[in-house]
Structures are given as structure tokens and as C-alpha cells.
């Protein structure tokens, strides 16, 4: 096992000073509908971007800043809380505590976290309809069906600057509608880094099957879906010889949602934005059809090589968590999960590495990294002092970017979640620098249709035709939320 060199730590922290939603150096984003990541900042510009925000010299007399959230409780990722009670010697906990304390002392406020067991979206709807100023900020796990009636447009928050690196510009571009952005993502939430998909691989099995240097494949841009299947075609095996493939056997890949999780680094773009920042359905794209066809063929041809505990036989009684058990027991060469799940392997005997999820093919310009559990921030329209809210949010976001993010990164290193310098390099250059989002459609039918197509149960053209009207109707209703 290689030691993590001091130079790598410095490099990691320097890389984190760049924008999360950036990508290949020197490339500009083509438009708001471009889901690829793009690095639009030079070193000099990055230095300027790191300057503290210019905020009014205000004190808020101990104001209680109330944050409504829900802790999903997966037990996989790191701390989901924005507010912790005190220091306990654990690096990330203490960083969260000090982040809040620094802002509290600077602005004379007090952060209060209200954790609900119900749906945050339901609670916000109820309080806004009642005209209650109950919360200053809300954290929503999924994309809410809430527009400007319930949530403030972030573009109108006076001191929030969404162009600064502590806010994710790719998210803003994908989820704005009619030029309005009712939720935002940034450094305030650790889950934005913790749940980003990465591909873990078992180094012992990689050696046993004489795989080439996977890190080098990533570096030269040839880590693709065809390469993945080429390298893993002889891996899957019926270990106990019972003639059934279940959680007791060996697989090339294991992960929730099967081919969807394996292909999470492939851009599937059903929706584009028009000149008015309105999402439009684009089912006529030849590239879309080709991409879906390719993924379907992989799913059909390599069905036995991909283990999914949600659909395949699992004798362990541990449901989704079977993926952790099996990877730890050397029963899979590859699997994909959020980076924070690396903490599950601190006691793993075999070494593992981390690389980005593969591209569709070498024509895909850059790696495309998908978040698993994006937590979005929203400001209820019942907030009575939006200027105060904007000052507190920007101060909290800046403090998080400068101090909480590096502490999170250092936690991964210090507690040896990752085990080699090359994995850190993968995070720096190919994972955190290529986080992307697809434009929001607001259509549940579209999500269902995508799953059925990738599952191979329906033909592409006929499925498009039968669902098109329903999807467009849902999108039209969604857009109305942002008028």
C-alpha cells in the first residue's frame, strides 16, 4: 500500500480551490443545456474568485437562522447535518461545528437545524400556504415540484453570487427555468461531494485477471464502456458451483440499478434548453437513440456479468447493502457508488482503487460524473428579510468552501478511505472536476420511460411515441411553476 504523500495532499487541496463544476482545461460551456463540465477559469481568475465576498458590515442581534432538513439515514455517507452540537475530535464533525461558529460570531446569528421525519417539500408547502415565516432555509433531497410560489429565486438574493466557486454553476444552468432558480447546490452541503458517483475496483482481482493500468486508461481517455466489457468478459463465475448466480458468486460488476449505474458516466440527454431557458423534449436526436441502443445491448449481452441486489437473488438478507458485503469479500471486480461509501472499506483486506465511471466511447470528450444524493437548498417565500438571508447564505457558503471542503478531503486522506496517490489524482483531475447535471424536465413519466428502455422491456421508437404527449404535458405544468 502506498503512503499518501504530502505533495499529494497539497495538490488535492489546491485542486479543490477550483470550481466543482469545471472540466477539461480551457473549454467553455457551450450553453445552459450542456451537461458537461467546463473549466472556465485560469489560475489568476481562480485566485480572484477565492477573494471573500463583499458583504455589509451587519450584526443580526443573535437572530436564529432556522434550517429545515431531513436526514435520510442511509448510514453510508458522511455527516448529513448542517449543524452539530459541539466538537468531538472527529475531523468532519469539528469542521462542521467550526464552520457554523465562525459565521455565527461574524454575523451574530445562531444556526438552528429542524429535522423532520416527513417530506420537506410537504412541510414547506404547508407553511407557505399558511403564510408562516417558519424557516429561513430548507434542504430538499430530490428535485421538488416547487416553483416561485413557494421558493425564492436565488437570482434575486442580493448578496448571493452564484458565479463564485462555492456555488455549483452546472447545477444552476441545468435547473433554472425561465431564468429563475428556486434551488441551488454548493459547498454548504457535504453530501454534494460525498455522494458523487465513482467506480471502485478490487486491485487483487484486477491483478488476478491481468488487467492493464486502469489509471493510465483514464488518463489517456480510453476508459470507456467497450473497454470495460473487453476487460471483464471472463470474470463472472459461479463460485459455489450450484448453477445459480446470486450473492454468493463472483461478478464483473455489482451495483444498484444494473446498467443504469454502470452507465452513469454516459450522457443521456432527453431534454435541452431553448433560448428562453425553457426545457424542451428532444426525442428526435440520433445521438440519443444511438446511446440508448448501445446501453440496451450491453445490458442484454452482459446480463449475467452485472449483479443488482434489487433484481437478482440475494440470500444475505441485507437488501441494497449487499453491494458492500460482496465487494469487501472480493466478489466483484468493479462497483459504482458515491465516494463517501469508501468508508465502508477501511477494514478491507484487499486493496482497492477509485476511477471515474467509464465514458460511452472515445468520442465522448470528457468523463461525466453524476451525483447520487443531491441535497438542494431552497429559501421559502415567507422569509421576511431576504437581504439578511442572502448575507448569511453567502457567508456560510464561503466559509464552507474555504474550510469545510478541505477538512472533508483531509478526512478521506487521514482515515485512509482511499489507499493510493493515484486514486487521489482521479478525484482531483477526473471526478470532482467533471460533475455534471442534465436539464430538469419535471416529468416522472420521462424517468419511468428511461428505466423501461434501459431495461430492454420496450422498443425505443414505440416507447417514445407512446409517452411523448404525457411527458410534454408534465413539462408544461412544471415550467408554469417558474412563471
Image: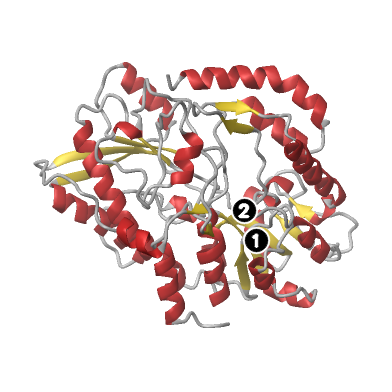
Label 1 and label 2: CA atoms lie apart by 7 Å
Please state the horizontal and vertical placement of residue 45, each as a whole percent of the image.
Answer: 36, 59
Classed neighbour count for the residue bearing mark 1: other residues with Cα under 10 Å, few (<14), some (14–19), many (≥20)? some
Residue situated in front as seen by the camera: 44 or 243: 44
- As displayed, is residue 183 above or below residue 414? above
Q: Quadrant of the C terminus?
A: top left
Instruction: Please state which of residues 206 and 21 is positioned toward the viewer in this rendering.
Output: 21
- What residue sits 63% from the left and 20% below the top? 472
Per the image, the residue denoted by label 2 is: 321
Q: Which residue is mark 1?
A: 325
Q: Classify mark 2: helix, strand or loop.
A: helix
Q: Position of residue 274 (x, y in %)?
A: 55, 28
* Residue at 65% in and 61% down: 325
Label 1: which secondary element = helix
Quadrant in which the N terminus appears: bottom right
Direction from residue 310 to residue 41 in the image, left or right:
left
**Is residue 68 at all visible to an observer of this figure?**
yes
**Rendered residue at 50%/65% (across/down):** 428
The relative height of residue 8 versus residue 375 in the rendered view (above or below) is below
Amino acid at each position: 500500500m502506498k503512503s499518501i504523500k504530502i505533495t499529494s495532499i497539497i495538490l488535492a487541496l489546491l485542486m479543490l480551490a477550483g470550481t466543482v463544476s469545471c472540466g477539461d482545461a480551457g473549454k467553455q460551456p457551450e450553453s445552459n443545456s450542456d451537461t458537461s463540465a467546463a473549466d472556465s477559469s485560469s489560475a489568476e481568475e481562480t485566485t480572484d474568485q477565492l477573494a471573500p465576498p463583499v458583504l455589509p458590515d451587519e450584526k443580526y442581534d443573535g437572530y436564529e437562522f432556522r434550517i429545515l432538513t431531513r436526514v435520510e439515514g442511509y448510514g453510508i455517507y458522511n455527516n448529513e447535518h448542517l449543524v452539530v452540537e459541539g466538537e468531538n475530535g472527529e475531523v468532519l464533525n469539528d469542521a462542521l461545528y467550526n464552520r457554523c461558529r465562525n459565521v455565527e460570531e461574524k454575523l451574530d446569528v445562531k444556526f438552528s437545524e429542524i429535522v423532520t421525519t416527513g417530506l420537506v417539500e410537504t412541510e414547506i408547502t404547508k407553511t407557505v400556504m399558511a403564510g408562516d415565516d417558519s424557516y429561513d432555509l430548507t434542504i430538499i433531497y430530490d428535485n421538488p415540484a416547487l416553483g416561485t410560489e413557494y421558493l425564492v429565486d436565488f437570482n434575486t438574493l442580493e448578496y448571493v453570487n452564484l458565479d463564485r466557486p462555492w456555488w455549483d454553476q452546472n447545477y444552476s444552468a441545468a435547473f433554472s427555468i425561465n431564468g429563475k432558480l428556486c434551488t441551488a447546490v454548493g459547498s454548504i452541503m457535504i453530501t454534494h461531494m460525498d455522494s458523487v458517483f465513482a467506480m471502485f475496483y478490487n486491485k487483487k482481482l484486477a491483478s488476478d485477471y491481468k488487467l492493464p493500468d486502469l489509471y493510465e486508461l483514464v488518463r489517456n481517455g480510453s476508459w470507456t464502456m467497450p473497454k470495460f466489457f473487453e476487460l471483464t468478459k471472463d470474470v463472472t463465475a459461479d463460485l459455489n458451483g450450484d448453477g445459480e448466480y446470486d450473492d454468493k458468486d463472483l461478478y464483473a460488476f455489482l451495483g444498484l440499478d444494473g446498467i443504469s449505474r454502470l452507465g452513469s458516466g454516459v450522457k443521456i440527454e432527453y431534454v435541452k434548453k431553448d433560448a428562453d431557458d425553457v426545457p424542451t423534449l428532444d426525442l428526435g436526436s440520433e445521438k440519443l437513440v444511438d446511446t440508448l441502443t448501445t446501453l440496451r445491448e450491453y445490458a442484454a449481452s452482459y446480463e449475467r456479468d452485472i449483479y443488482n441486489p434489487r433484481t437478482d437473488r440475494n440470500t444475505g438478507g441485507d437488501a441494497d447493502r449487499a453491494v458492500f458485503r460482496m465487494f469487501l469479500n472480493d466478489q466483484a471486480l468493479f462497483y459504482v457508488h458515491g465516494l463517501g461509501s469508501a468508508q465502508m472499506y477501511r477494514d478491507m483486506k484487499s486493496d482497492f482503487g477509485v476511477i471515474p465511471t467509464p465514458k460511452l466511447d472515445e468520442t465522448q470528450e470528457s468523463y461525466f460524473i453524476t451525483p447520487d444524493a443531491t441535497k438542494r437548498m431552497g429559501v421559502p417565500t415567507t422569509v421576511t428579510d431576504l437581504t439578511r438571508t442572502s448575507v448569511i447564505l453567502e457567508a456560510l457558503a464561503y466559509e464552507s468552501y474555504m474550510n469545510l471542503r478541505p477538512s472533508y478531503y483531509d478526512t478521506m486522506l487521514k482515515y485512509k478511505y482511499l489507499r493510493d496517490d493515484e486514486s487521489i489524482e482521479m478525484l482531483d483531475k477526473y471526478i470532482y472536476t467533471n460533475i455534471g447535471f442534465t436539464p430538469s424536465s419535471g416529468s416522472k413519466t420521462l424517468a419511468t420511460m428511461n428505466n423501461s428502455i434501459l431495461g430492454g422491456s420496450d422498443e425505443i421508437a414505440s416507447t417514445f411515441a407512446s409517452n411523448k404527449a404525457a411527458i410534454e404535458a408534465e413539462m408544461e405544468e412544471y415550467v408554469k411553476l417558474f412563471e
